[in-house]
Image (cartoon, coloured by chain):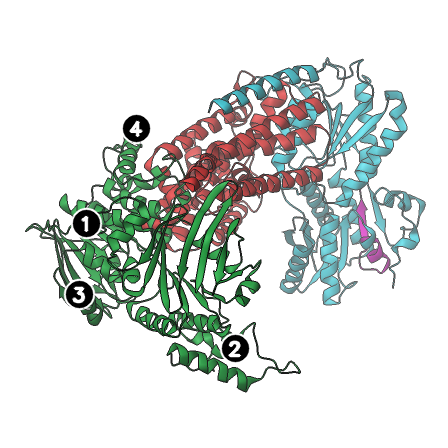
């Protein structure tokens, strides 16, 4: 077991960890939750030997451990599986597992047979079947991650820390990972598990530690804990709902209709969205959802079918045309296609409005009305609670959550009628995620038609009125409210 | 914003304070006259020009501005100027020669700027080899009106509104060259081709005119297949000559009107292995052309007097500054160098116009 | 909370990266003026200041053009060639075709528009990299300029041309500098206050995001190069007035100066950064360097050396400062 006793740490006079006390036992999974900046990564860096605590102690199996570097941390029995893969693609799985701790015989020759035996044993313990002679690079990222775990296990740790392991995994891969974690738990290891996905904490963890501003706000078992409670400990206030109440605002009026619509590898689809309705679009990565939307707004070639806006056939030649007809596509990667990060906040917020020719912002002679622009920006910043020092700040200096808010605000400012959110909460802290779900619900209450694309089913279930599922370029299923996650997963 | 505004104000104030302190003599400031042309420029120093010889200044500054700093011709000219400065410096409290020009003939705006800036800098006299007969004209007129004496060397200004011109009579020189070639080298049959460095500068055009005139007079049977423009690019010339020879199988003679065009022609002949079979004559010389003359690849070279242009040019400036008159258009002379006469005293003197320390042994190629 | 407060003070300086670069170059400019005034009597004189304004006119205008191009993360290497061809065509109109001056001027501007449009098509619609495309149009344009008159210059232009080129308001402000100033002001307004200006920055900072934001990227790029070409046409007319002739090789290589000026003034070759004010100050810095050094009697080679060092230092300084504020 592992115990943290009165751990404190500060940087340049800032206290980043205050009096941290908690324990995790063998055969236990302890989840570590908290917003960005709460102190999770600092804590783990202390555990891994990169940082040194100012005061307090870490005890493993009752013995105080003191290490000054990562090698010593290894020796003390601490293993950390990071989010970033650090394997060597052109070496075999087996070689990767033993890298750095190769088995030598007396004459320093690597004894392959012993190595393979040892590596096999580890994968057995993990309950994973794999060809250890294949090159690491030939396996997908999720399998490479499992090899990372094996590598960590090879050093014989007593405590294993998982640092946000599921971020890039699909639902199926996630299950595989959790199976491995369960096996490790059965094996008697102590597991500390850091994640942003609250549902995972609820399903996997035995105990939970919630950090807020460097201090512990909750340490205890998962009995009676749910996502909302975890969030309230994370932010220190009562969060009634992580997801907003699913009041259906759907009107009878059809905002957008796709009939037999498709292009590229997206087969002809039929989708209808009413004003006031939030429709989720589920599917695996590569199932064609983003591609379908790109065809819709004219960013990809349209081959089949028609689009109807407000019941009338529409011709959308490109994003500019889509914008003018009231459609906003909020890009899945805000860095690549969603924001001009090096430009100031107000520049980003006003850009679609200017491109649309919105009269309050730009007059007929193409001159920008800077006062109106300022006002509009101010409104957006207030409405979406964007944390910034000044609207002239470069967007790249904001946190991911605030950046995403701006990526959304720019379209709200442009009087959009039909919103398409593509992975709206990717890489964002918990509080902002909730805020965004609320924004989506508010927009629908104001009458907008909304499509939400997401690979994270709980999110769709929590935020949408109904869900369509795409698989391999085809629309394969439709679900109403109250659908279970496994149903969606099956359909994928 | 307040911070930057006060910074700007401080800077502006300091600039003005310092400028007025540090600026003792804005004596040579005279803005260009209101009408562009029509003012008669001074042909001699007799007329009133606000003199730049303040009692407060000792020593003179003479700026030499060639058409480009690329060719060795200008180095010779510069040496001549510097020697004159050394020789006569004592009488004037020291004469400083500054040498600056554009890197290539094509940067004409640079030459205009150099002339203008020399005047602002208070130069007493300029020796300018203009890059074009017309482009620097106005700048030179401005300089003269501001009281700076300007002598155009080597290249003619049109209209010749500088204080004086001192250069080669290119027409006569090349006529003489043609005469030599027809009398001593050619048999009056076949054709001849020309390599000219451009067709815009007077000097180049004069040389072409002179040679053609000479050839037509003394070898009327010979056909002129025309000229190619080389832009003084050796590699370019090589290509042009090869093509010329391909197209005309009865070429008996090539004329290159400057040193670099000649070198290009030389290379072309060597490459074909026919050096000596086609006569080659040129204007100016360098060690390579002299070596070629020894081996019989070049039969005759028309030499100008670059050193003299610099030396005499400075002397002319000094004369003007003393209030004397000089020839409005002086001829710096030329010499036809041939394989026969190249070791004579006269020839050596002429060659040393280009290469000050030349010795006959130098023209025998090493190995 | 703690981290946020820490961030706030750092953030204040981050916004003003652009402004501080302008301040920096302004300081450098003044420092140079003070330095040269000290070093030589002739520098800070009315005549020389007039000359400096003459000398900066052509470069200033093409620098404005280059600013737009560089902000879109492009580059225009054909500027010098456009200047040359413009002078030739315009001079031909007056001397060979005996057309009135206004027509000749328009003809010259059409040259600029034409080459600019060619660049625009190649880069915006055919998707060629700007470097390659403008390298190509540069070569073709230079060749056309030389072919038209066999490399010969055209002179005997009407007197009005050289008069215009030499004269000005009193003896303080040359005509050609007035034109440059008008262009600078107009283009500054275009860049900062119109939707086209916004689109320029949007395309340069992230063309993909701009596209998805509803900006017609191809159209913006085309217009940028068209505008740049037109401005170079104007610069060409002015060059013709200065040289009093049509010279095919006039302006050759000038784009190197305009690119340096834009970068010194805070522009980034990666796009999305730059301002007209900064770039013009950069152009003045380069002209004053050249002018001052010549007046001090320092040879051209040293001028080139020093200009190179100024360029590298300005960019280095800017890069380091950016890195620091980004952390």
Q: Which of marks 2 and 4 is nearer the N terminus?
A: 2
**Chain letter for the cyan part:** B
Q: In this rendering, do the residues under marks 1 and 2 share a single chain?
A: yes
In contact (CB < 8 Å): disc 4 and disc 1: no
* Chain letter of the residue carrying label 3: A
Front one among C40 and C38: C38
Q: Which of marks 3 and 1 is nearer the N terminus?
A: 1
* Chain letter of the residue carrying label 2: A
Location of mark 2 (residue): A95
Location of mark 4 (residue): A371
Visible in this render: residue A292?
Answer: no
Give the residue furthest to the front: A62
| Residue drawn at 63 percent across, 35 percent down | B110
Q: What stretch is highlighted in magenta?
A: B289-306
Helix, strand or loop for disc 3: loop
Q: Earlier in the sequence, mark 2 or mark 3?
A: 2
Helix, strand or loop for disc 1: loop
Q: In this rendering, do the residues under marks 2 and 3 share a single chain?
A: yes
Would you say residue B300 sits in the magenta stretch? yes
User: What is the display colour for chain A?
Assistant: green
């Amino acid at each position: 077991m592992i115990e943290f006793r009165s751990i404190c740490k500060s940087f340049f006079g800032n206290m980043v960890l205050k009096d941290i006390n908690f324990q995790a036992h063998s055969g236990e999974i302890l989840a570590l939750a908290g917003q960005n900046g709460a102190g999770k990564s600092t804590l783990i860096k202390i555990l891994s030997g990169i940082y040194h605590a100012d005061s307090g102690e870490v005890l493993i199996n009752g013995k105080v451990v003191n290490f000054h570097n990562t090698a010593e941390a290894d020796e003390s029995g601490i293993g950390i599986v990071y989010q970033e893969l650090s394997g060597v693609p052109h070496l075999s799985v087996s070689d990767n597992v033993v890298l750095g701790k190769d088995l030598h015989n007396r004459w320093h020759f690597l004894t392959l047979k012993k190595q393979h035996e040892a590596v096999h044993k580890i994968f057995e313990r993990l309950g994973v079947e794999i060809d250890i002679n294949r090159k690491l690079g030939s396996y997908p990222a999720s399998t490479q991650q499992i090899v990372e775990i094996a590598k960590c296990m090879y050093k014989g740790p007593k405590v294993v820390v998982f640092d946000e392991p599921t971020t890039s995994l699909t639902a199926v891969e996630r299950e595989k990972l959790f199976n491995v974690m369960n096996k490790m738990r059965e094996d008697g290891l102590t597991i500390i598990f850091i994640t942003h996905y609250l549902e995972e904490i609820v399903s996997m963890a035995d105990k939970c530690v919630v950090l807020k501003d460097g201090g512990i706000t909750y340490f205890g078992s998962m009995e009676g804990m749910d996502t909302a409670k975890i969030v309230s400990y994370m932010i220190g206030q009562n969060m009634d709902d992580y997801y907003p109440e699913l009041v259906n605002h759907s009107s009878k009026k059809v905002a957008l209709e796709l009939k037999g619509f498709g292009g590229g590898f997206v087969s002809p689809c039929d989708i209808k969205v009413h004003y006031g309705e939030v429709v989720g679009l589920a599917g695996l990565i590569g199932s064609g959802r983003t591609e379908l939307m790109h065809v819709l707004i004219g960013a990809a070639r349209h081959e089949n079918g028609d689009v109807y806006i407000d019941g009338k056939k529409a011709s959308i030649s490109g994003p500019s045309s889509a914008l003018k007809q009231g459609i906003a596509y909020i890009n899945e990667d805000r860095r690549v296609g969603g924001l001009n990060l090096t430009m100031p906040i107000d520049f980003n917020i006003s850009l679609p409005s200017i491109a649309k020719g919105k009269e309050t912002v730009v007059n007929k002679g193409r001159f920008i009305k800077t006062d109106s622009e300022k006002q509009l920006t101010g409104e957006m910043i207030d409405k979406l609670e964007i944390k910034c020092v000044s609207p002239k700040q470069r967007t790249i200096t904001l946190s991911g959550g605030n950046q995403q808010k701006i990526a959304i605000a720019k379209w709200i400012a442009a009087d959009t009628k039909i919103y398409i959110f593509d992975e709206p909460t990717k890489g964002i802290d918990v509080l902002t995620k909730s805020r965004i779900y609320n924004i989506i619900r508010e927009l629908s209450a104001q009458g907008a038609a909304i499509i939400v694309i997401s690979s994270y089913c709980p999110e769709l279930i929590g935020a949408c009125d109904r869900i369509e599922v795409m698989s391999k370029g085809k629309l394969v299923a439709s679900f109403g409210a109250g659908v279970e996650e496994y149903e969606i997963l099956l359909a994928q | 914003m307040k911070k930057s505004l006060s910074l700007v104000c401080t800077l502006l104030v300091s600039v003005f304070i310092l400028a007025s302190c540090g600026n003792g003599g804005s004596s040579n400031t005279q803005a260009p006259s209101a009408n562009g042309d029509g003012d008669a420029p001074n042909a001699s120093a007799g007329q009133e020009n606000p003199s730049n010889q303040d009692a407060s200044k000792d020593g003179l500054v003479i700026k030499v501005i060639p058409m480009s700093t690329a060719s060795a011709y200008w180095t010779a000219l510069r040496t001549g100027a510097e020697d004159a400065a050394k020789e006569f410096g004592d009488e004037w409290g020291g004469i400083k020669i500054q040498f600056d020009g554009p890197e290539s003939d094509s940067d004409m705006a640079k030459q205009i700027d150099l002339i203008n800036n020399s005047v602002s800098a208070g130069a007493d006299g300029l020796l300018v080899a203009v890059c074009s007969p017309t482009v620097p004209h106005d700048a030179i007129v401005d300089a003269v009106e501001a009281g700076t004496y300007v002598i155009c060397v080597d290249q003619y200004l049109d209209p010749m509104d500088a204080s004086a011109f001192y250069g080669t009579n290119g027409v006569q020189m090349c006529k003489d060259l043609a005469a030599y070639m027809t009398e001593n080298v050619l048999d009056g049959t076949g054709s001849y081709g020309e390599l000219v460095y451009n067709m815009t500068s007077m000097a180049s055009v004069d040389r072409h005119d002179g040679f053609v005139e000479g050839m037509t007079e003394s070898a009327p049977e010979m056909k002129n297949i025309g000229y190619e423009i080389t832009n003084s690019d050796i590699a370019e010339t090589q290509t042009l000559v090869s093509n010329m020879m391909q197209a005309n199988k009865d070429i008996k003679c090539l004329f290159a009107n400057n040193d670099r065009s000649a070198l290009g022609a030389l290379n072309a002949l060597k490459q074909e292995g026919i050096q000596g079979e086609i006569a080659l004559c040129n204007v100016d010389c360098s060690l390579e052309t002299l070596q070629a003359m020894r081996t019989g690849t070049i039969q005759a070279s028309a030499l100008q007097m670059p050193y003299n242009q610099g030396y005499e040019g400075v002397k002319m400036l000094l004369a003007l500054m003393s209030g004397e008159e000089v020839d409005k258009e002086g001829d710096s002379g030329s010499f036809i160098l041939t394989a026969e006469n190249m070791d004579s005293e006269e020839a050596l003197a002429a060659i040393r116009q280009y290469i000050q320390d030349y010795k006959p042994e130098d023209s025998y190629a090493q190995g | 909370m703690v981290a946020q407060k820490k961030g706030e003070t750092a953030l204040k300086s981050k916004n003003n990266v652009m402004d501080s670069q302008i301040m920096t170059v302004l300081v450098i400019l003044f420092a140079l003026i003070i330095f040269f005034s000290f070093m030589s009597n002739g520098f800070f004189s009315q005549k020389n200041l007039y000359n400096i304004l003459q000398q900066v006119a052509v470069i200033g205008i093409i620098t404005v053009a280059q600013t737009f191009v560089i902000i879109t993360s492009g580059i225009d290497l054909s500027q010098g060639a456009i200047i040359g061809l413009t002078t030739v065509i315009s001079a031909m109109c007056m001397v060979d075709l005996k057309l009135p001056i206004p027509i000749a001027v328009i003809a010259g501007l059409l040259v600029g528009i034409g080459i600019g449009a060619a660049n625009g098509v190649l880069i915006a619609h055919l998707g060629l990299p700007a470097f390659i495309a403008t390298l190509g149009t540069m070569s073709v344009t230079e060749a056309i300029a030389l072919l038209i008159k066999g490399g010969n210059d055209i002179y005997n232009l009407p007197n009005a041309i050289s008069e215009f080129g030499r004269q000005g308001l009193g003896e303080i402000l040359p005509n050609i500098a007035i034109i440059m100033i008008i262009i600078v002001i107009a283009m500054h307004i275009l860049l900062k206050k119109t939707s086209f200006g916004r689109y320029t920055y949007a395309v340069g900072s992230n063309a993909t995001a701009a596209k998805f934001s509803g900006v017609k990227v191809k159209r913006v790029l085309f217009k940028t190069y068209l505008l740049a070409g037109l401005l170079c046409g104007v610069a060409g007319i002015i060059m013709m007035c200065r040289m009093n002739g049509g010279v095919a090789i006039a302006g050759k290589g000038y784009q190197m100066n305009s690119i340096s000026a834009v970068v010194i003034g805070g522009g980034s070759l990666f796009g999305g950064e730059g301002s007209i004010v900064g770039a013009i100050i950069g152009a003045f810095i380069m002209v004053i360097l050249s002018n001052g050094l010549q007046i001090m009697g320092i040879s051209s080679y040293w001028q080139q050396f020093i200009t190179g060092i100024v360029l590298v230092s300005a960019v280095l300084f800017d890069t380091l400062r950016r890195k620091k504020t980004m952390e």
